[in-house]
Amino acid sequence: MRSDGSAPVVDIVPSIELQDVRAHAHRLLREHASCETVEIWRGGFLLQRMTR
């Protein structure tokens, strides 16, 4: 998500292991300067929100 609350990109990661998904989220924040927040969802539930 960008700082204005928009989410121009959705990246779906097919992984069972939450640690793998968290590592991917950290990479997104590190590699994409316009990315301010990454949300981790599973089965319609927000598990974690990671902010730069």
Image (cartoon, grey):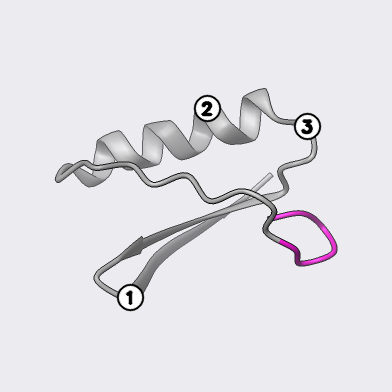
Q: Under tag 1, what secondary structure?
A: strand
Q: Based on the displayed image, in which of its 4 quarters is residue 17 positioned?
A: top left
Looking at this rendering, what residue extends furthest in the top direction?
31
Q: Residue at x 67, y 59 (%)?
A: 7
Residue drawn at x 24%, y 42% as measured from the top left: 14
Q: Is residue 3 magenta?
A: yes
At label 1, which amino acid type do we have? Answer: Phe
Whether the residues at callouts 2 and 1 have beta carbons within 8 Å, the answer is no
Residue assigned mark 3? 33
**Proximity of marks 3 and 2: CB atoms separated by less than 8 Å:** no
Residue that label 1 marks:
45
CA gap, disc 2 and disc 1: 22 Å
Disc 1 to disc 3, how far (Cα)? Answer: 26 Å
Left or right: residue 30 versus residue 20 is right
Mark 3: give few (<14), some (14-19) or many (20+) Cα within 10 Å. Answer: few
Mark 2 residue element: helix
Span shown in magenta: 1-6
* Residue 51 image point, x, y percent: 64, 51
Residue under circle 2? 27
Which circle's residue, 3 or 2, is located before the other in the chain? 2
For residue 25, side relative to residue 18 (left or right): right
Q: Main secondary structure of the magenta part?
A: loop
Report the amino acid beneath label 2. Answer: Arg
Most distant residue in the left direction = 16
